[in-house]
Image (spheres, rainbow, N blue to C red):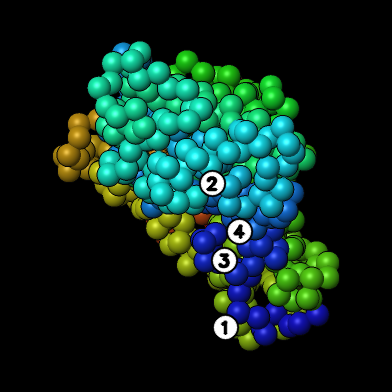
């Protein structure tokens, strides 16, 4: 096994630039669920591994698994907006245009990458119809997805596509329809394309079309963008349902941030969530996927040429303060995301090299890594927060004003009063606390519980958790303590010199006694 001092890092935090992503890929259950065609909506927080699964799917493309992937820059957003259907609810106004784009995507796979196509004599007619439509409409067998709605092309309705132009009230040439008329005939076009695709697809091959990076253009409050996302989710659900009925292995997969999915409201949302979605999570339960397993594959890739390397082969078997294991200590400072653990381990490696370490990583290396890692975690939040809350920097100033890792609502309110005059949006202190909770900057102490185990509720540990405005005690995420330069809370009984305190305050004290000091 190579020495730790000889390696550069354990990979990158961005899946698009991570050299170890594929060679050290962790087969998360969400990846397996998609690969086995059991789930088709992949939810997760930014950095949880959605794009890693997307890239892995693209790289598992073989003769029996054919995958097409689309990213933000591929989507014909401008021309897509022109295909909005009328006379339907807003959340359904883009379903038909997404169905058309999905159909063209599968047609591209069949016509250009399926070497068995058409797989049997009974599929020849459908295959010929599909090819004629694509070539006549776009002039090529493999059109760019970004040109799917290009107005300069016309839709071919000749041959056996079966479009009744009289019913559509279109006074155009019988062979071709301008794209600005697509919303008028799109349902008939989609119905015929879908039938041709499902009839001519090889039952022994998996065909997968993936949509990633949908969040890059998303802005909270943009109703039209939300309607497009709803349309894609509904279109995916319908296509996948039709494929199952025809006993064909075709799947549309949508990768989407959990927080964006949670704000969408449409009729099929719960059906998709219950029957079609998989959420990427790490270390949330004893049985869940572990970030330690993900890191062990990376350790093996850079240290031992692929041979097994355990966490304890890299980190000394010495507990941190308060008998906490090194892995738990580091995990508490992440948002339970691969990119966080990779970054933390990389910073530990830097600290190890600076002190001229030999052998395994020590407690001292982890402690030295916490400050640069804390800056990284804050910058991660800076990437997300401005779109949602322009005053986010002032929110952090309020937390700095409080000055301690654990605090009461009253202490926060006093600090809030010092800074509320700077806010561009007039919101009460409770609303600021709720916003900080939504991004797991703080967690709240659940009222009514005892002091057994962790009573703090965190959004990154439970995406369904909601803020409780009745909570009286809060704590700042461990990973932000160094950047915010917070100190540990002085216990209420010691501070006030009194013997009695409330049950909740006693629970806070008891929890604090078991927690790891921020040394």
Mark 2: few, some, or many residues within 10 Å (few <14, many ≥20)?
many
Q: Is residue 345 above or below residue 91?
A: below
**Nearer the viewer's eye, disc 3 or disc 4?**
3
Which dot, 1 or 2, sits closer to the camera? 2
Labelled disc at residue 383? none
Query: Marks 3 and 2: which is nearer the front?
Result: 2
Q: CA distance from mark 1 to mark 2?
A: 53 Å
Determine the secondary structure under disc 3: loop
Mark 3 surroundings within 10 Å by alpha-carbon count, few (fewer than 14), some (14 through 19), many (20 or more): few
Q: Nearer the viewer, mark 4 or mark 2?
A: 2
Residue shown at 51% from the left, 27% from the top: 160
Mark nearer the N terminus (4 vs 2): 2
> Where does residue 284 sit, x and y in percent of width and height?
67, 40
Q: What distance separates the C-alpha of mark 1 from that of mark 3?
A: 24 Å
Tell me the crowding category of disc 1: few under 14, some 14 to 19, or many 20 or more residues within 10 angstroms, Cα based. few
* Disc 2 element: helix
Residue 327, horizontal then vertical, whole percent: 70, 57
Outermost residue to the right: 307
Q: Is residue 395 visible?
A: no
Dot 3 or dot 2, earlier in sequence = 3
Q: Residues within 10 Å of mark 4 (few under 14, many from 20)?
A: many
Q: Earlier in the sequence, mark 3 or mark 4?
A: 3
The front one of 376 and 272 is: 272
Whether residue 211 is visible here, answered yes or no, is yes
Report which residue position mark 4 lands on: 341
- The numbered mark, 1 or 3, whose residue comes first in the sequence reads 3
Q: Position of residue 433 (x, y in %)?
A: 38, 34
Return the residue nearer the eye: 400 or 51: 51
Residue bearing the label numbered 1: 354
Query: Residue 330 occupies which quadrant of the picture?
Result: bottom right
Of 101 and 340, nearer the camera is 101
Name the mark on residue 108: 2
């Amino acid at each position: 096994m190579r020495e730790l001092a000889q390696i550069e890092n354990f990979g990158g935090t961005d899946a698009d630039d991570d050299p170890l992503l594929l060679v050290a890929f962790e087969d998360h259950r969400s990846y397996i669920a998609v690969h086995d065609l059991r789930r088709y909506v992949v939810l997760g927080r930014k950095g949880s591994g959605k794009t890693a699964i997307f890239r892995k799917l693209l790289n598992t493309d073989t003769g029996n698994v054919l995958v097409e992937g689309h990213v933000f820059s591929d989507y014909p957003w401008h021309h897509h907006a022109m295909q909005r259907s009328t006379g339907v609810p807003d959340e359904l106004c883009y379903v038909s245009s997404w169905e058309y784009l999905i159909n063209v995507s599968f047609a591209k796979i069949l016509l250009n990458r399926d070497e068995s196509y058409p797989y049997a004599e009974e599929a020849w007619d459908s295959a010929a119809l599909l090819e004629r439509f694509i070539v006549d409409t776009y002039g090529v067998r493999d059109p760019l997805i970004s040109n799917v709605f290009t107005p300069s092309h016309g839709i071919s309705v000749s041959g056996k596509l079966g479009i009744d132009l009289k019913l559509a009230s279109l006074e155009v040439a019988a062979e071709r329809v301008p794209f600005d008329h697509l919303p008028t005939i799109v349902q008939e076009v989609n119905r015929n394309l879908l039938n041709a695709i499902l009839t001519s697809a090889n039952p022994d091959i998996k065909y997968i079309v993936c949509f990633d990076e949908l969040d890059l253009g998303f802005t909270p409050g943009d109703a039209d963008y939300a309607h497009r996302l709803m349309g894609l989710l509904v279109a995916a659900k319908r296509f996948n349902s039709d494929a199952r009925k025809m006993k064909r292995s075709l799947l549309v997969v949508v990768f989407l941030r959990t927080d964006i999915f949670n704000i969408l409201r449409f009729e099929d949302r719960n059906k998709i969530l219950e029957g079609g979605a998989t959420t990427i999570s790490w270390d949330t339960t004893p049985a869940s996927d572990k970030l330690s397993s993900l890191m062990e594959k990376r350790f093996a890739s850079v240290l031992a040429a692929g041979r097994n390397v355990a966490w304890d082969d890299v980190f000394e078997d010495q507990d941190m303060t308060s008998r906490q294991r090194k892995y738990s200590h580091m995990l508490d400072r992440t948002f339970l995301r691969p990119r966080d653990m990779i970054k933390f381990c990389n910073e530990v490696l830097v600290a190890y090299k600076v002190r001229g370490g030999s052998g395994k990583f020590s407690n001292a290396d982890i402690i030295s890594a916490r400050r640069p890692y804390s800056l990284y975690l804050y910058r991660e939040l800076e990437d997300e927060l401005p779109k949602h809350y322009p005053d986010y920097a002032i929110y952090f100033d309020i937390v700095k004003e409080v000055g301690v890792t654990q605090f009461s609502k009253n202490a926060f309110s006093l600090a809030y009063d010092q800074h509320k005059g700077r806010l561009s949006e007039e919101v009460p202190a409770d609303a600021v606390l709720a916003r900080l909770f939504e991004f797991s900057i703080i967690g709240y102490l659940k009222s009514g519980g005892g002091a057994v185990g962790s009573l703090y509720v965190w959004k990154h540990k439970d995406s369904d958790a909601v803020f409780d405005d009745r909570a009286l005690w809060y704590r700042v995420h461990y990973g932000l303590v160094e950047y915010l330069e917070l100190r540990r809370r002085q216990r209420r009984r010691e501070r006030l010199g009194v013997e009695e305190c409330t049950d909740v305050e006693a629970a806070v004290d008891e929890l604090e006694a078991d927690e790891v000091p921020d040394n």
